[in-house]
Image: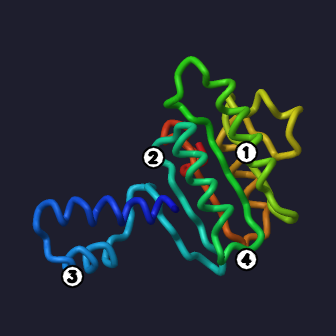
Amino acid sequence: MTVWDRFQKNISTVGEYFSVPPEDIVSAIKAYEPTLKRSQVIEKSGHTIVMDCYNANPTSMKLSLADFFSATQRKEGIIIVGDMLEVGEKESEEHKTILGYIATNIEQGDICIAVGKRFYQYKDFFPYSFFFTANEAHNFYQTLPLNGKYIFLKASRGTNIVTGK
């Protein structure tokens, strides 16, 4: 079950609880478009961006990556992960675990970019592009051919990964 499937199920349950007619629930779900960098899907210049950069923790990161890796329309991908700032005392271990999860699911032709000091500490252990700052990652990203790519972007808002600062 994808994050979107769980979202729809939760909305349906709440709607039923408040006696909202089923056709109104379906209409609301169809009309919903995520904003504010939360689970947004953006079609732009021949490529698709799946962006969730409001918050990130190990559970949300893994679920979002699982959705990305299982997408049926997925072509060659660019996976961009930024530091998870909502982790706590096991942050180092959790960042390494996410990189390992990517390693077991990444496909030939995919590119992985890891951004931030928490991911950067593993630059010698995984064959990805690591950047200490969002600005460095942004400069690298600008050199990539994006046409036809399926791009995944997930990070905590505090990484500034969307603005590239």
Vertical relation: 161 (above or below) 121: below
- Mark 3 element type: helix
The answer for how far apart the CA atoms under marks 4 and 1 are is: 26 Å
Quadrant holding the C terminus: top right
- Mark 2 element type: loop
The single residue placed furthest to the left in the displayed view is: 19
Q: Residue at x 53, y 28 (%)?
A: 87
Q: Nearer the viewer, residue 71 or 84?
A: 71
Q: Earlier in the sequence, mark 2 or mark 3?
A: 3
Q: Earlier in the sequence, mark 4 or mark 1?
A: 1
Q: Earlier in the sequence, mark 2 or mark 4?
A: 2
The answer for how far apart the CA atoms under marks 1 and 2 are is: 21 Å
Which residue position holds label 1? 101
Q: Nearer the viewer, mark 2 or mark 3?
A: 3
- Mark 1 element type: helix
Q: Are marks 4 and 1 in contact (CB under 8 Å)?
A: no
Q: Residue at x 86, y 65 (%)?
A: 109
Q: Nearer the viewer, mark 4 or mark 1?
A: 1
- Disc 2 marks which amino acid? Tyr
The quadrant holding residue 26 is bottom left
- Disc 3 marks which amino acid? Glu
Q: Nearer the viewer, mark 4 or mark 3?
A: 3
Which residue position holds label 2? 54
Q: Residue at x 75, y 32 (%)?
A: 120
- Disc 4 marks which amino acid? Asn
Q: Position of residue 139 (x, y in %)?
A: 73, 51
Q: Which mark is residue 147?
A: 4
Q: Nearer the viewer, residue 10 or 52?
A: 10
The answer for how far apart the CA atoms under marks 4 and 3 are is: 38 Å
Q: Which mark is residue 23?
A: 3
